[in-house]
Image (tube, rainbow, N blue to C red):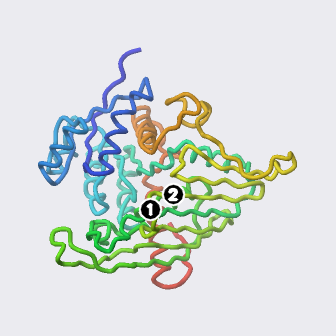
């Protein structure tokens, strides 16, 4: 067997997600050996020269640029990974697609459904591989949850209930970062956190039919990052709530907040069916809670916690012996393996990966929640 081929990567953005994705590209061949290809970290883009130079050294990129077009146009690059703020998803991604590059784009795909449609349509026209980085699809326990639901083990599904809670902007003196400005982010925790739980609902249970939403901004002005003595207006939601109905008849609730004091990264969902229920908590990502009615007849009863570290469970065979847990960073390794394998072997991104169609539908659902919050009415979701 010959050595795996190399595949050139351009990374747009060097902050939080840039660090997570870089780690995934570098670690994937080590765990998924032999890899479909070895990612070669060619070039990284950032607006600030000194910071992007430092990131290039830290993450292992050979080159750095302060013009994203140079990264996208680089002839050594086959894959463009867009980790930029939401207002920078459309132009660089379309440019990359039109130049025949395969694209991994951070979530949400865009600021709204109209922008997401542009990306979806560009991807369809070009025929390249495109994926939205909904990394929680690649938690082994989440894929086990999907298998349980799709196998019919829970029977008819009645409820999907999900919460994604953080508290990092509770302090009123936290500055007016880009995530608090609608012209950059599109929305607040709805897009930042809610997009994840919407995606998990679609991935595990089914398509959305209608939504009723409410949004709230608790602190309407914050210090400007460049001049803390002055304040600017917060133009996104600080929290949202929604009641949902799915095509299969299930109903449920969604909630996301960055004002849930004491919650750091609490992504939790519960699914209730006629034969049983499951519950997942990202802060205990190696575990899946399962309740089956049939256990009552066997004198077992109650909820049971499955430690998802067996070799038969998704991705676990690539890591450690049973009982040895994995972490948050492994979701990106699994995600990048799936994406690179799809590119190299010309395999479908779906159903395990989120396509740009999935990203578009996610944005449409979020638009419907905002419209419902504005009008006070239930909104039918139309794609």
Q: Secondary structure at mark 1?
A: helix
What's the residue at 85%, 47% (across, down)? 299
Which badge, 1 or 2, is on the more N-terminal residue?
1
Q: Position of residue 60 (x, y in %)?
A: 23, 35
Identify the mark at residue 193; answer none if there is no mark. 1
Identify the mark at residue 269; answer none if there is no mark. none
Q: Is residue 20 above or below residue 36?
A: below
Check disc 2 and report the residue beneath it: 267
Q: Position of residue 77 (x, y in %)?
A: 25, 38
Q: Secondary structure at mark 2?
A: strand
What's the residue at 51%, 51% (across, down)? 283
What's the residue at 27%, 76% (across, down)? 222
266 relative position to 52: left or right: right
Q: CA distance from mark 1 to mark 2?
A: 9 Å
Q: Is residue 273 above or below residue 98?
A: below
Q: Quadrant of residue 356?
A: bottom left
The residue furthest right is 297
186 relative position to 208: left or right: left
> Badge 2: few (under 14), some or many (20 or more) residues near its Cα, within 10 Å?
many
Do the residues under discs 1 and 2 have CB atoms within 8 angstroms?
A: yes
Identify which residue, 23 or 90, lies in the foreground.
23
What's the residue at 49%, 30% (across, down)? 319
Q: Position of residue 383 (x, y in %)?
A: 50, 66
Q: Is residue 306 above or below residue 240?
A: above
């Amino acid at each position: 067997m010959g050595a795996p081929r190399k595949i050139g990567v351009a990374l747009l953005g060097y902050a939080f997600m840039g660090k997570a994705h870089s780690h995934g590209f570098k670690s994937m061949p080590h765990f998924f050996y032999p890899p479909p290809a070895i990612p070669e970290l060619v070039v990284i883009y950032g607006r600030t020269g000194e910071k992007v130079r430092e990131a290039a050294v830290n993450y292992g990129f050979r080159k750095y640029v302060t013009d994203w077009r140079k990264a996208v146009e680089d002839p050594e690059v086959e894959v463009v990974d867009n980790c930029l703020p939401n207002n920078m998803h459309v132009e660089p991604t379309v440019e990359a697609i039109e130049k025949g590059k395969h694209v991994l784009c951070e979530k949400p795909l865009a600021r709204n459904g109209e922008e997401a449609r542009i990306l979806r349509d560009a991807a369809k026209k070009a025929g390249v591989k495109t994926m939205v980085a909904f990394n929680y699809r690649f938690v082994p326990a989440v894929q086990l949850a999907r298998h349980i639901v799709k196998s019919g083990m829970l029977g008819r599904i009645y409820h999907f209930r999900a919460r994604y809670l953080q508290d990092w902007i509770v302090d009123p003196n936290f500055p007016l970062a880009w995530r608090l400005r609608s012209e950059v982010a599109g929305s607040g925790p709805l897009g930042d956190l809610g997009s994840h739980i919407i995606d998990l609902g679609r991935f595990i249970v089914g398509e959305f039919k209608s939504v009723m939403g409410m949004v709230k901004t608790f602190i309407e002005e914050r210090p400007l990052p460049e001049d803390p003595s002055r304040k600017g207006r917060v133009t996104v939601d600080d929290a949202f709530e929604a009641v949902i109905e799915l095509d299969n008849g299930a109903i449920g609730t969604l909630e996301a907040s960055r004002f849930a004091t004491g919650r750091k990264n609490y992504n939790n969902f519960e699914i209730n069916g006629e034969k049983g229920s499951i519950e997942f908590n990202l802060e205990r990502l190696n575990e899946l809670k399962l309740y089956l009615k049939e256990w009552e007849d066997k004198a077992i009863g109650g909820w049971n916690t499955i430690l998802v570290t067996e070799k038969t469970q998704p991705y676990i065979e690539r890591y450690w012996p049973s009982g040895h847990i994995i972490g948050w960073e492994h979701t990106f390794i699994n995600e990048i393996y799936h994406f690179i394998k799809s590119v190299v072997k010309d395999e479908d991104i779906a159903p395990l990966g989120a396509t740009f169609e999935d990203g578009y539908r996610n944005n449409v659902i979020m638009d419907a929640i905002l419209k419902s919050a504005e009008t006070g009415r239930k909104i039918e979701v139309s794609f």
